[in-house]
Amino acid sequence: MVKVIKAPAPLENGTSVYLAGSIGMGSAGNWQTRVEQALSESDRNFLIFNPRRDDWDSSWTQDISNLQFKEQVEWELSAMEQASIIAMYFDPSTKSPISLLELGLFARTGKLIVCCPTGFWRKGNVDILCKRYGVKQVESIQELVHTIDRNLKILLVESMFERTDWKTKGER
């Protein structure tokens, strides 16, 4: 069963996917819902962390002194750090400066999957960074969903083996 956790709800432990990428203060299409729906067809148990907050108020001052804004940013950072997979989408109709920042921050973690379609204003930068740090790239949201699903399958099988007690100490 898939469980979606949206900001600012408390995070839960378990195999998880964080939906990073374009929101653009609401100007980007709601690609997160499309990915959630596609992944919800899975019979596997995992979490989806979605930063697209239902009660977001675009009038909030983006300043550390604004408690709602600070809570949102801290939730996002904690969720990305905890996530098993970070799926990142760059909507060509946005600039997505925060997503670019997050790409740089998490490029070396080995858990990013990036979809940066032709037309995104800094696609060249994204492509070079992904190639340099071995970040998996896909061409479409459909391929993003497929790659997430494949990686989840691998992670869930690996976690089953980690839970078995037939291994002796030191074989991990």
Image (cartoon, grey):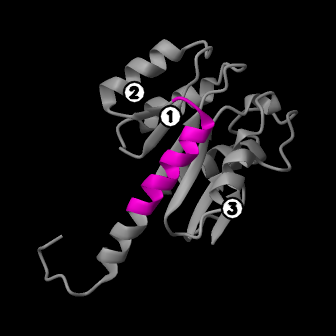
Q: Is residue 166 left or right of residue 85?
A: left
> Which badge, 2 or 1, is on the more N-terminal residue?
1
Between discs 3 and 2, the one toward the N terminus: 3
Q: State the residue lying farthest toward the bottom.
A: 165
Residue 12 can be seen in this image: yes
Residue visible at 53% across and 60% down in the picture:
16
**Front-most of residues 96 and 35:** 35
Marks 3/2: CA–CA distance: 27 Å
Dot 3: what SS? Answer: strand
Residue 172, how many percent across, how many down? 18, 70
- The majority secondary structure of the magenta stretch comes to helix
Asked if the residue at tag 1 contacts the one at tag 2, i.e. Cβ–Cβ closer than 8 Å, the answer is: yes
Q: Amino acid at mark 1?
A: Val
- Per the rendered image, the range of residues in magenta is 139-154
**Which residue is at a point 79% across and 31% down the rendered structure image?**
25
Quadrant for the N terminus, please: bottom right
State the image coordinates of residue 133 (x, y, percent, origin top left). Answer: 32, 30
Look at mark 2 in the image and give the residue it sits on: 130
Q: Label 2's element? A: helix
> How many neighbours does mark 1 have within 10 angstroms: few (below 14), some (14-19), or many (20 or more)?
many
Tell me the amino acid under the disc marked 3: Val
Q: Which residue is mark 3?
A: 4
Q: Is residue 117 above or below residue 146?
A: above
Residue topped by disc 1: 114
Please indicate whether residue 114 sits to the left or right of residue 171 in the image.
right
Q: Residue at x 72, y 19 (%)?
A: 93
Going 85% across and 34% down the picture, which residue do you hit?
A: 58
Report crowding for label 2: few under 14, some 14 to 19, many 20 or more residues within 10 A (C-alpha): many
Q: Is residue 84 visible?
A: no
Q: Earlier in the sequence, mark 1 or mark 3?
A: 3
Q: Considering the numbered disc 1 on the image, is that residue within a helix, a strand or a loop?
A: strand
Q: Locate residue 62: give its quadrant.
A: top right
